[in-house]
């Protein structure tokens, strides 16, 4: 957090980001700008069957057609992505619109990359516009994860390009289950914290990450008390964006890595793993990064950033104990041993144990 004489920063967020209620109106101009005439809409089962929102998205395509609507389930199962890619290929789509949470967006990245590769095109030749309905910020990261046939989470091979545009329209998020919205908000908080605690100098992203912490602490409780508060939801979305200007370091910080190790295997959503692990990872990191932890404490408006995060999770009524998900000590020891390397297995086991 101190002064540094030299440093480098690479912008890796999407080129265009639109926000605010009603910003779905930006979809048609974006597709026109990107030259998309036939789009596959990649979404989730619950959005497709339980709301009229997919119809609203399809109605906002402007002159573009939507010959395919594909569904991707939680943790982006590779079998569903493969089937969706085949159908999108047959429909001769030339662009992707993802509408949903991280799994739908990650699945859409893989579909776009695979279609481009099969057609001998550059990845940018199959554009991807995301309309997120959670705060997981998968839309801000070029890479992604999928779940293999064994149920293990794996990074997507050959997917590394930032999306072309993102639309944060709070009106389209009200149907998202409140617990999912709030827990993905803790995921955004996790991204902000991991970015601040990352090794090296990152003064640009630190300013945004600390502002993300402030906004999330202020606005997540507002949405819990009034889920229809679109202004607070928009603040949540802007904070999630601010949390992720350092995607690589945030996505591979300790809390994330430990969460991914147990999430897919035990059916725990990403946002919930952040609720369960983040305060304990922060306590573990506190002696190693006292200055950065002090800056985080100031942003949370407290003496102790880890305690403030634990209190926020409790205030939002979100899960706090791994044991509630049927995860036992043997599972956690195995996970700690598999992750051991930079951090000793015994120390990782200690973090997991504290989260039980």
Image (spheres, rainbow, N blue to C red):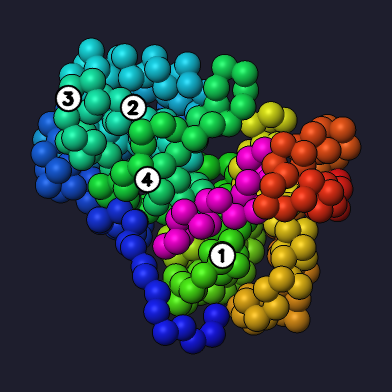
Q: CA distance from mark 3 to mark 2?
A: 14 Å
Q: Badges 2 and 4: C-beta atoms under 8 Å apart? A: no
Q: Which mark is residue 142?
A: 4
Residue underneath mark 2: 111
Residue 42 in the figure: left or right of residue 310:
left
Residue underneath mark 1: 198
Q: Badges 1 and 2: C-beta atoms under 8 Å apart? A: no
Q: Badges 3 and 2: C-beta atoms under 8 Å apart? A: no
Identify which residue, 272 or 50, lies in the foreground. 272
Q: Residue at x 32, y 48 (%)?
A: 162
Residue underneath mark 3: 120
Q: Secondary structure at mark 1?
A: loop
Q: Badges 4 and 1: C-beta atoms under 8 Å apart? A: no
Q: Residue at x 42, y 22 (%)?
A: 81
- Sequence-first tag of 3 and 2: 2
Q: Given this view, does label 4 or label 3 mark the residue nearer the observer?
A: 3
Q: Is residue 131 visible?
A: no
């Amino acid at each position: 957090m101190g002064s540094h004489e030299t440093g480098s920063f690479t912008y890796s967020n999407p080129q265009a980001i639109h926000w605010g209620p009603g910003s779905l109106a930006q979809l048609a101009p974006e597709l026109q700008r990107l030259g998309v005439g036939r789009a596959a809409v990649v979404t989730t089962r619950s959005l497709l069957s339980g709301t009229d929102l997919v119809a609203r998205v399809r109605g906002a395509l402007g002159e573009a057609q939507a010959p395919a609507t594909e569904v991707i389930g939680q943790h982006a199962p590779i079998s569903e992505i493969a089937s969706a890619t085949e159908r999108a290929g047959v429909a001769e789509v030339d662009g992707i619109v993802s509408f949903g949470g991280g799994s739908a967006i990650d699945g859409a990245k893989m579909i776009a990359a695979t279609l481009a590769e099969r057609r001998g095109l550059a990845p940018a030749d199959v554009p991807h516009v995301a309309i997120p309905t959670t705060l997981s910020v998968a839309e801000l990261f070029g890479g992604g994860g999928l779940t293999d046939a064994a149920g293990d989470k794996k990074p997507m091979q050959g997917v590394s390009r930032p999306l072309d545009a993102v639309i944060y329209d709070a009106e389209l998020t009200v149907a998202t289950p409140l617990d999912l919205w709030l827990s993905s908000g803790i995921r955004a908080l996790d991204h902000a914290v991991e970015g601040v605690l990352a090794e090296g100098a990152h003064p640009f992203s630190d300013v945004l990450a600390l502002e993300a912490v402030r906004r999330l602490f202020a606005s997540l409780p507002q949405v819990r008390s009034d889920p229809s508060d679109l202004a607070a939801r928009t603040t949540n979305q802007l904070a999630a964006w601010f949390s992720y200007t350092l995607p690589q370091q945030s996505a591979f910080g300790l809390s994330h890595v430990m969460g991914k190790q147990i999430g897919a295997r035990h059916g725990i959503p990403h946002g919930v793993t952040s609720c369960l692990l983040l305060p304990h990872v922060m306590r573990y990191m506190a002696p190693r990064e006292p200055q950065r932890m002090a800056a985080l404490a100031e942003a949370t408006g407290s003496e102790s950033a880890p305690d403030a995060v634990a209190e926020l999770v409790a205030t939002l009524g979100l899960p706090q104990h791994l044991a509630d998900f049927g995860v036992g000590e043997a599972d956690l020891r195995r996970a700690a041993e598999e992750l051991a390397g930079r951090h000793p297995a015994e120390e990782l086991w200690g973090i997991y144990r504290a989260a039980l």
